[in-house]
Amino acid sequence: MLTALGVTIEAIETSPYSLDAITWEESDNSRGWRIKLYPDLAHDGPATPAVALAIADISHRTNPLYIETPPAEFNRLSSAYVESRGLGEPEAERCKAILVTVDAVVGRCVALDYLLRESYLTARELRDFVSYFRGRILGLRSTLEVLGAHAVLRAGSRGEVIDRILSSNRAYELLVLVDRLENVIASRRVRHVDVVEIYEALGTVDSVPERIPERISLLQAMTLGQARQRAAAYDVAISHADQDQAIAERLAELLIERQYRVFLHKFERANLWGKDLYEHLADIYLNRSRYCLVLISQHYFSDRRQKHELLSAQARSYGMEHEYVLPLRLDDTDIPAILPTTGSIDLRLTAFEDVVTLVVDKLES
């Protein structure tokens, strides 16, 4: 990795006085860079991904891993944004300082994705990195780094997040924030407008930075662990595009014939009538089903409903010991939220009855 990125490291050491969990500085004698870690990160935590992230950030200075807004332009846009919000002193300066922090950490999120794609880190190492920081969130930077790692691992991460917390409206905002980070990571372009959007998603616009601890506390609560309080109402919830309705119906009918409970929009029209669909569907896909069967096709994201369902299902998968989202491919379409390495079944190569048998195997295992 050092050779590939052209980075020279003089020393890796621990420092209890670091202002961040990971810091680095160029040595006075120009022999390379010195990376400093908090002692507990080095001894009790995942030092490997921390050091790899530091190396990636150092390399980015001379060999950019992503496109970003130049500092002078970033400062100009931040000043214009603060003015448009009508913020006075000292709120304006704190707002601009937080925007700089968000910009730096979003860049780190892109760097994490690079390290994973280039196999400098494994998904397991990055999951350990997330788990370590969940219980040690001290500020905005660490909060965003945890969320960024979630965005990188979106499809496969199954951490210790509890469903009771994730089902709250504020927690759902965090999953929306992960979705926004994921879009930035996919484009490998960190624009000022992206930074502002993420900043606003943190709820810091009108009260800088008073609401940040609220988000931090919420993330810390995600590590507490608690048994699911409500029994699943459905064995399988099917998420599909309207264009794939006939396929979804056929699968649902076969499962129902085998005495399994299936959530399908068409079968629930009377139950859905008059309900707040935004909240109700989130509850179904996040809390009330044992598995989520996702029909992947070119039409899947043609409506916001599917994205909302998948976002809720991904939130659920964070808190489970086994896989929850079951991808069923109808064509070769790639969905960013589901990694290509995630196991899937291809309906073009598998009979309907065989797909249902595989789902039943999951339910009975």
Image (spheres, helix red, strand yellow):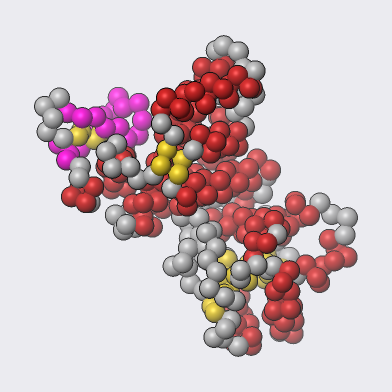
Residue at image point 57% right, 83% down? 348
Which range is magenta? 8-27
Q: Position of residue 286 (x, y in %)?
A: 65, 57
Give the camera-side residue of 365 and 48: 48
In the image, 33: left or right of 342?
A: left
Camera sees residue 102: yes
Q: Residue at x 50, y 55 (%)?
A: 154
Q: Is residue 326 left or right of residue 168?
A: left
**Is 240 inside the magenta-drawn segment?**
no
Image x and y of residue 124, in percent:
37, 57
Q: Is residue 262 left or right of residue 99?
A: right
Question: Relative to the observer, which residue lies in front, 207 or 17?
Answer: 207
Return the x and y of residue 114 as percentages of the image width and height.
Answer: 36, 51
> Which image quarter is the C terminus in?
bottom right
Picture quadrant of residue 197: top right
In the image, is residue 14 part of the stretch drawn in magenta?
yes
Residue 69 vs residue 104, the one in the foreground? 69
Q: Is residue 57 above or below residue 247?
A: above
Within the image, what quadrant is residue 209 found in? top right
Residue 50 seen in this snapshot? no
x 60%, y 28%: residue: 204
